[in-house]
Image (cartoon, rainbow, N blue to C red):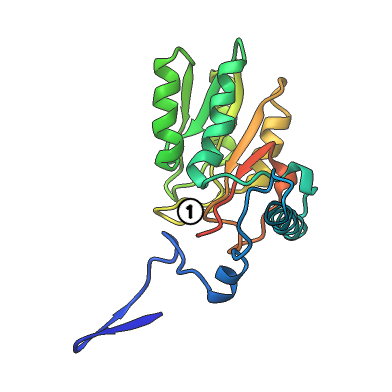
Amino acid sequence: MQTETSSVTRHYFDWAGTAIPDTALADETVPSGNPSSRHREGRAAKEALENARARCAAVLGVEPSTLYFTSGGTESNCIPLYSNLLRPAGRITASLTEHPSVSENLQTLQRLGKPIAGIPVDTSGRVSPGLLAQTLKKHGDTRFAAIMAVNNETGAINDIKALREILDNCGVPVHFHCDMAQAAGKIPVNLALCDSAAISAHK
């Protein structure tokens, strides 16, 4: 996209930060009403919401009942992260290069008494299966792992399938959460490889 301002032409290159809404997409938001209400506007909003859920689920290869709409990527990361407060025991392990919506909330969880461990990355900025295995061996009480699919700053792409295999073979059940905000729509994603994932529509 480019815009003209006086004699200067500006080009928009921050699509990874946020995408400019498509007019066709904006038209999809026309039905307004509380989808939980029984009046005509509410029923129309409910139908639009469930149609959107079914379409998104079909694209992502998941059941519609497993797809939840939130206010954005940060909330989608926070919900599974803070679910750890309901677990009486277990460490949260996360890569050292997670998005602030994960890393800053991990600091809050740590202040609330939850043990946290960091997974280092290699020289390419990726979490290698070996580094994950070493971290799990060192912190055998890990019950939750947060590793992003694509880094929002470096573009480093993690091998989610290989990391899932490490988690499956560590000897204890570990919930695998994956921030896929920078992956969905850009590279193939397989949500079956993780227990929860965050995807942002505006990326």
Q: Is residue 119 left or right of residue 166?
A: left
Tag 1: amino acid: Ala
Q: Quadrant of residue 32?
A: bottom right
Q: Which residue lies furthest to the left in this view?
A: 7
Looking at the image, residue 74 lies above or below residue 30: above
Q: Residue furthest front?
A: 39
Q: Quadrant of residue 108?
A: top left
Q: Residues within 10 Å of mark 1 (few under 14, many from 20)?
A: some
Q: Where is residue 86 in the image (x, y as percent from the top left)?
A: 61, 16
The answer, for residue 140, to whether it is visible in the render is no
Camera-nearest residue between 182 and 162: 182
Q: In this view, does 82 lie to the left or right of 99?
A: right
Q: Quadrant of the N terminus?
A: bottom left
The secondary structure type at the circle numbered 1 is: loop
Residue sitting at x 59%, y 41%: 178
Q: Position of residue 146 (x, y in %)?
A: 55, 34
Residue sitting at x 43%, y 30%: 105
Q: What is the count of numbered marks?
A: 1
Q: Where is residue 31 in the image (x, y as percent from the top left)?
A: 63, 62
